[in-house]
Amino acid sequence: MDAFGPRHEAIGRVIEISGSGAKVEIEGSRLLELTSDPDPSVALSGQVGSQVKLESGRRWLLCNVKSLKVADVDSGRVVAEIDFLGEGDEDKQTRRLINFKRGITSYPIPGNRVFPVTGNDLKQMFAADERAHIEIGTVYPTKDVRGALYVDALLGKHFALLGSTGTGKSTSAALIMHRICDQSPEGHIVMIDPHGEYSAAFKGHGELFNVDNLAMPYWLMNFEEHCEVFVTSSGAERQRDMDILAKCLLIARGRNRAAEGLTKLTVDSPIPYTLTDLTGAIGNEMGLLNKAGDTAPYMRLKSKIEELKSDPRYQFMFSGMLIADTMANFLSKIFRLPAKGKPISIIDVSGVPSDIVSVVVAVLSRLVFDYAIWSRSEVQRPVLLICEEAHRYVPADKTSNGQSVRKILERIAKEGRKYGVSLGLITQRPSDLAEGVLSQCGTIIAMRLNNDRDQQFVKNAMPEGSRGFLDVIPALRNRECIVCGEGVSIPIRVAFDELERDRRPASSDPVFSDLWRQSGDEEAMVGRVVKRWRAQGR
């Protein structure tokens, strides 16, 4: 064995090369021998989803094993397909892998030898460099190599966390957010929480908002969002209703003092107005009509506005108390400006009526983006917007309701990076997401996905070299993930760290076998539930 030679014997040779990978022939008997090695990395080398290294001149190429098949039953030879991950040198004194870099500069040639990868090699491969990073767990198959995400690359190019329900997705999202918040106490994170899970995880670490304390003024909506809430008709009638609303909304906004001196007042300007002024303007326009038969669109708009004003479910947004100019205060509290050690806002929209929840998410998302655009001349304060259940808001079906939220989230995915807006998408159904949004996410954190369409969708969104790695997605255990893309040096499989109980979201599965053996206090419990149900409060 020469000075450059590795500690372990070769297990095979390269037989075919292509642009992103190669085929290698491995001795089946050597694979069996390796399984008893005390180093877990060596023991798994050559198996599907594990790593091997190839000699190429005076360098090592690190590769991921994509598939195995028997080439010759009698001799026990096996052919493996491999993807190239990166390359590095070997330190002549210690024989350790050093200077590991993603991607390769020179290809091996047929006949080059293949060797198992050691735990020390993996440490070099996965070791975080001096860039700012957070540690989220342990790299498979090792017990001590830490898996790290580079924060600036993770947030700067957007990220997606995917996984079937019950795989530990919410807890993993909470873990990543906690790690970022611990490192960046003056951060600015806005999280849309559709199920009220995350309030339990961030008590004391962030500001918690729900329908009781959100107080989001209706006049912050732009014209498109107004139409989604106020205009109930369809077809040709809808266009007529929208024209009337545009004219009357401009009149109502123009009556506010904040509009004085503005030469470019539009229906989209976030100027406070009273709903009474709006209905008054609609009434005045109706009074100017020649024929009584044309009043239907005016009456439709008026009755819808009156309904929203009087319905207690909509008070968090359409209350008469929200007419004051509170825009600066609202932006400060939602975007955590200043953060005061609580860098995350959890906005629980589970209590928002289902017919306007997409508008509420649209307004919050658009405020993040518009604030970034209009603050470009100021000191940059990047904002991270996290959307749980993202397939609800950016669906693949373009005919569904809630087009305004779809448009703004697609725009943030495409353009947000230029303005300092980062997007984090969390979903259990990536195949239901609008095409193009997932491919804008530079980092994909994929937990187990049981559905074939979802698996294929994620593969298609990933760079060519990572696709073989994603083949193991159906075989992942709970709280395990594959991380590919900008946020990691090379694709890694990670077992997430255990999260402290008081930092976990309220999303644990019910234990049927225990709970269905217990009884007591049912009558009083049902009475309390009915009372809360009727009062529409918790």
Image (cartoon, helix red, strand yellow):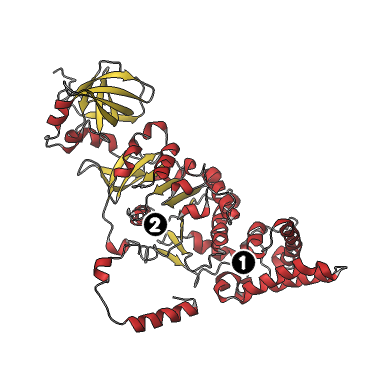
Left or right position of 307 against 340 = right
Instruction: Name the residue: 12% across, 34% down.
Output: 37
Mark 1 lies on residue: 218
How crowded pointer 1 is (Cα within 10 Å; few <14, some 14-19, many 20+) is rated as many
Which quadrant holds the C terminus? bottom left
In the image, residue 506 above or below residue 491: below
Q: Position of residue 532 (x, y in %)?
A: 45, 79
Q: Position of residue 252 (x, y in %)?
A: 73, 67
In the image, residue 39 above or below residue 355: above
Dot 1 falls on a residue whose secondary structure is: helix
What whole-number distance in Å separates the C-alpha atoms at marks 1 and 2?
31 Å
Q: Nearer the viewer, residue 373 or 136?
A: 136
Q: Hey, what amino acid is under mark 1?
A: Tyr
Label ID, residue 185: 2
Q: Hey, what amino acid is under mark 2?
A: Pro
Q: Position of residue 64 (x, y in %)?
A: 29, 31
